Amino acid sequence: MRLPESAHTGQPWRIHEIAPDFDVEDVWKFRTPGGGPDDFPALLAALRAERAAESTGVSGLLFKIRWKLGALLGWDRDDAGTGTRVPSLRERLPADLRDTDIPAEDDPLSALYVLGNEYAAEIANSTMHGIMHLGWVPDTTGYHLHMAVLVKPNGRFGRLYMALIKPFRYTIVYPAMTRSWERTWNDLTT
């Protein structure tokens, strides 16, 4: 379910101090019925283990097309990524976040930090520098997962690119991700 920007900005996330110059592009809620305060690490591990499932169907096809176009047009060259075109946000992390255990392999995203209720990873290419932020949010029925996508488009072309892919994100990618992630939660808890 799509949420207003305030659902992300109104939370006391650590990402706010690290990336205040990024725009909130999208905020989504995933149903995790029965989620408890300590379930976030298990959900993250299950999502990483199930990542292959997201490479199927129409959404998976769109990602394959995007990576092919990126290779053909040079959008994803090494010199367009973090550490080259833009510095990694790891350089902005305060010491307590730099010392968190992060997954060694989160390709194509690079994990920034993991806390008991928050995870952030980054990606950069010639179109934008982006962050996927996951948060574990209490509500009246327990806890649910929020995903926010934060971006810093690379110039006019980056803004155009983000505008062009928005309909695909809203109608195909995020609904497929929602089904997959909610299924992962259900498998984890049944």
Image (cartoon, rainbow, N blue to C red):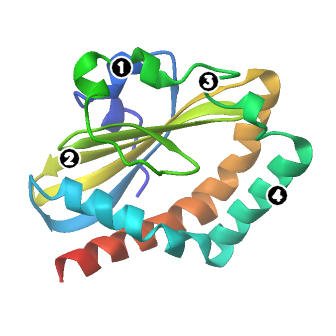
Mark 4 and mark 2: span between their CA atoms?
36 Å
Q: Nearer the viewer, mark 2 or mark 3?
A: 3
Q: Position of residue 116 (x, y in %)?
A: 17, 44
Q: Earlier in the sequence, mark 2 or mark 3?
A: 3
Q: Position of residue 170 (x, y in %)?
A: 59, 56
Answer few, some or many: residues within 10 Å of disc 3's Cα (few below 14, many 20 plus, some between 14 and 19): some
Q: Position of residue 137 (x, y in %)?
A: 20, 46
Mark 2 and mark 1: span between their CA atoms?
22 Å
Q: Secondary structure at mark 4?
A: helix
Answer few, some or many: residues within 10 Å of disc 2's Cα (few below 14, many 20 plus, some between 14 and 19): many
Instruction: Tell me the kind of residue under disc 3.
Output: Gly
Residue at the image point whose x is 9% and y is 52% from the top? 37
Answer few, some or many: residues within 10 Å of disc 1's Cα (few below 14, many 20 plus, some between 14 and 19): some
According to the picture, the residue beneath numbered tag 2 turns out to be: 137
According to the picture, the residue beneath numbered tag 1 turns out to be: 93
Residue 173, placed above or below residue 85:
below
Q: Nearer the viewer, mark 4 or mark 2?
A: 4
Q: Nearer the viewer, mark 3 or mark 1?
A: 3
Residue at the image point whose x is 68% and y is 57% from the top? 168
Instruction: Tell me the kind of residue under disc 2.
Output: Val
